[in-house]
Image: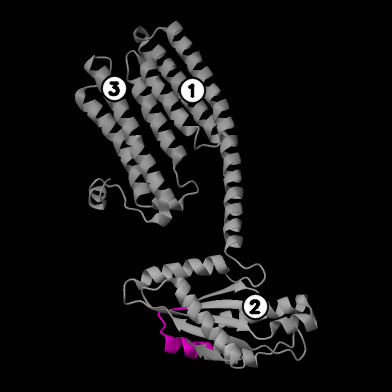
Amino acid sequence: MISPTLKKTLLIPVIPDNDKIQAIRVRRSLYAFIGAGIHTLMCMILWVDGLFRTTLWEFIGVFSVIWIGYFVNFLIIRLGINKRFKDPRLTFPMMLWAVSCLMYTIALTNSLRSVLLMFYLLILAVGAFYLNRFRYVWMVLYGIVWYLAIIIYFINYYPDLINLKTEMAVFFCYVGISFSLSVVCAKMNNLRKELKRKNRSLSAALKYIKSISVTDELTGLKNRRYIYNILSQQRLMAERKQYGFSICMIDLDYFKNINDLYGHLLGDKMLKSFAATVAKKLRKIDYFARIGGEEFLLILPLTDKIQAERMAGRLRETIENENFNNIVPGAKLTVSIGVTDYRWPEMIEETLSRADGALYSAKRAGRNQVKVD
């Protein structure tokens, strides 16, 4: 695994987790250097064999310009400038540069031009993954015009270096394969769009399933599964010895009577109103969930038992004074609350048992009370 220091040395960015797409773009721009390197190597072999019409310094000058273009593309993506463009992948301009450089070097080759032409098919194959149909056809036509211009150039200036029959055979094969790749590109684009659509639908479905698996449908609060998972996490954090938390077991007093008197529909509305009222009084770090019927559980991180008792007292007073006339005229709610704190290294079940015991102590004492274990 490459260390962040080595990545910095190699100009490979250490990109935050929330910008993984940009990291992929940077890697793609680095892959372009591999293709450019192979192209340069092939041209060097042709130059050594005397099949490249340049002096050494002209050769160095041509490929210096080619490599500068690739490096500028890499820097634009590496520095994040590409995000300002409509297509931040810069696939089309990069392909345009690659094809232009390739065709220019083909024009400098005395023979074996078809060897270099294979690189063009490689460029088209890569573009099939990222270009839409219009741009892909445009790129195919651009390459065809380039190669046709090269043939005309050789006929006019270097007729002794070209076999017209052979060159035209290569040209028509090249045109046929290019347009065949266009058809493949169109199909790949359709498949890619369909895959994206299905992935979006699947992501939305998974997000919904995950949400309903931890959410109480009636109140919109988290459910028993979620809050018990949070309790396990809180216990693990308490292993540090410098972290503590308290819990409050809350039960609505005589709520069965409300359902019997006013019906379950209005009872449900009162439950939702109660949940919303309590949620407004909590801190951002607190966790509040419905664990069944009219029973709720409140987790207070970084809170000792005395602070939790005060918090529970304020909640009890708030509910007692809350007006539910908009649901049922004259209806009132009170709550009984059992409070305890977590004591390492006990199991969560022991903590919940103490809170439950404190809750029933509050009920036996007449309800509408807060009791600490």
Q: What element carries label 2?
A: loop
- What mark, if any, has residue 43 been given in the picture? 3
Q: Three-letter amino acid code at disc 3?
A: Cys
Mark 1 or mark 3, which is nearer to you? 3
Disc 1 to disc 3, how far (Cα)? 21 Å
- Residue at 32% x, 77% y: name it: 242
Asked whether, in this view, residue 217 is left or right of residue 258, the answer is left
Mark 2 or mark 3, which is nearer to you? 2
Question: Foreground: 154 or 127?
Answer: 127
- What mark, if any, has residue 144 been given in the picture? 1
Is 166 placed above or below 119 here? above
Q: Do the numbered discs 2 and 3 sit on residues whose CB atoms are within 8 Å? A: no
Is 212 part of what is drawn in magenta? Answer: no
Residue on which disc 2 sits: 294
Disc 2 to disc 1, how far (Cα)? 75 Å
Give the crowd class for mark 2: few <14, some 14-19, many >=20 residues within 10 Å. some
Find the magenta span and give its range.
Answer: 300-312
Q: Is mark 3 on a helix, strand or loop?
A: helix
Residue 322 found in image quarter: bottom right
Q: Three-letter amino acid code at disc 2?
A: Glu
Is 302 part of what is drawn in magenta? Answer: yes
Main SS of residues in magenta: helix
